[in-house]
Amino acid sequence: MRRSRAFIPTTKEVPSDATLPSHQFLVRGGFINQQGAGLYNFLPLGKIVLEKIRTIVKDELDKADCNEVQLSFVTPIGLWNKSGRSDTMGKEMLRIQDRHQNDFVLSPTNEEAIVELVKNRVTSYKDLPLNLYQINTKFRDEARPRYGLLRGREFLMKDGYSFHASKEDMVREFDLMEETYKKIFTRLGLNFRVVKADSGSIGGDGSKEFHVLADSGEDTIIICDSCEYGANVETIQSINEDEFNELSYEELSKKTIDEKCSCGGELSFKKGIEVGHIFQLGNKYSSALEANFNDENGRAKPLEMATYGIGVSRLVASVIEQNHDESGCIWTKSTAPYLINIMISNIKNEAQVSLGEELYEKLKDLNIEVILDDRKERFGFKMKDAELIGFPYTVIIGKELVNGEVQIFDRKTKNKTSVKVDDIYTKIMELV
RNA sequence: CGGGGUGUAGCUCAGUAUGGUUAGAGUACCUGGUUUGGGACCAGGGGGCCGAAGGUUCGAGUCCUUUCACCCCGACCA
């Protein structure tokens, strides 16, 4: 992409209604803009990041034999009456009427719909196990949407559902999904923890949350410094939750818990953003909606189920909450909208232009995600812009070209490395 | 859903206590020129039903009523 042809409306001014770094930088960098309370448009850069995350999620799920589907976003109210959630979820479900005054709901989640889908289609133990998922828009009419993409009303979420002939097999799949989620968040380049969550009436290890560690996280979690143990403070009855909610991130990090972890390590508190949740459902919905299968003896049993969620649009903001500085976004390699930004320092300098164009064409041919900053702007303006947006690397073609050199600017470290013009390609190939 | 606050240029905001020329600034944008390694400078220019509706008045951004929207704190939640 040529920057001169791109729609990337960046601004120097901070939008008045944005309080978190991710919200401010995503708006200032031209990734998103607000359409209404909890409603966001994704502009070209935001859309690219969203799609990159979606692709990684899909790739890992498909490798684990999950089947992608797409359920209708608008659902008849009858679906929700059967499970009782039209009452229990209350006003969080946005209800609409069609021209015949029939009531509908914009899907906040899809347990009912997915059970209706497999009911009477999955009828034998031979059809099991089965794991279906979708990456689709959800709508939850939050009492108070806030924090930009972290708590919108309309958001992109991956929701998955697995069906099994036995609890043992459901637990096996649950564990597989935990491993799959770890692969996903690792590929995204995130520092995260898996924690025990409040599993409500199910109990046991029936519910686990995946938290991206970040100052602005809404949840307080306890983690061990030497093993993988983690828990949401909501699950620990001896902890005074209110006390920890008032502490800053730094104060919280220093505070350790009196008891040691069972592995002997130190336990400490961190703030986390919940980006994933896996939950053993059992037969709650399959019983309510009478979704049965026949076992080896020909007896009808309700399907054993588990459900799995990943907040895809929330992840866009989470990457920035965890990776930013005073200048703007610092995307991880796998989430960056473009990996290489080629900056022509002075567009009136023919030598700079021709080298920039040549490099741009060559990298495009190699399928490297590259953008060429060919705008008629000054050096400082383009640098600030590149830092705000957060391209991992910017190749600066500028005043050192007369000495046969260009610089490679590393967004994360802000270091500039001089490279001989002849060595640019090999150097870039080392980076990507 | 309780409490608080804000709606004026694309954006950030003055102006409203005490009604009175043609509604302002910065920034962004357009034109010309000078610049070209950290959001540069000079000159000129365009851009507004002052959130909406009703009312009071000779006259309303400003006063009254109604309404809508958005933000913050709390409760709730991926």
Image (cartoon, coloured by chain):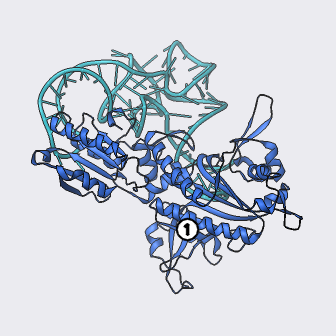
Chain colours: A blue, B cyan
Please, which residue is most extreme toward the bottom here?
A264
Task: Work out which quarter of the rendered image holds the N terminus of chain A and state it.
Answer: top left
Q: Residue at x 27, y 36 (%)?
A: A374
Q: Amino acid at mark 1?
A: Thr
Query: Quick check: B4 left or right of A402?
Result: right
Please report the residue visible at 62 percent of the width from the left and 62 percent of the height from the top. A277
> Label 1: chain?
A
Residue A290 falls left or right of residue A409: right
* Residue A223 x/y as whole percent: 52, 75
Q: Is residue A345 above or below residue A169?
A: above
- Placement of A160 over or under A235, stated as above or below: above
* Mark 1 burial class by Cα count in 10 Å: few <14, some 14-19, many 20+: many
Quadrant assignment, res A417: bottom left
Q: Quadrant of residue A375?
A: top left
Residue A52 coordinates in the image, percent (x, y)? 48, 49
Q: Residue at (67%, 66%) from the top-left corner?
A: A173
Q: Is residue B23 left or right of residue B62?
A: left
Q: How many marks?
A: 1
For mark 1, what is the residue?
Answer: A220
Q: Position of residue A214 (x, y in %)?
A: 47, 63
Q: Is residue A349 visible to the viewer in this orientation of the structure?
A: no
**In this image, A124 relative to B20: left or right?**
right
Residue A348 in which image quadrant: top left
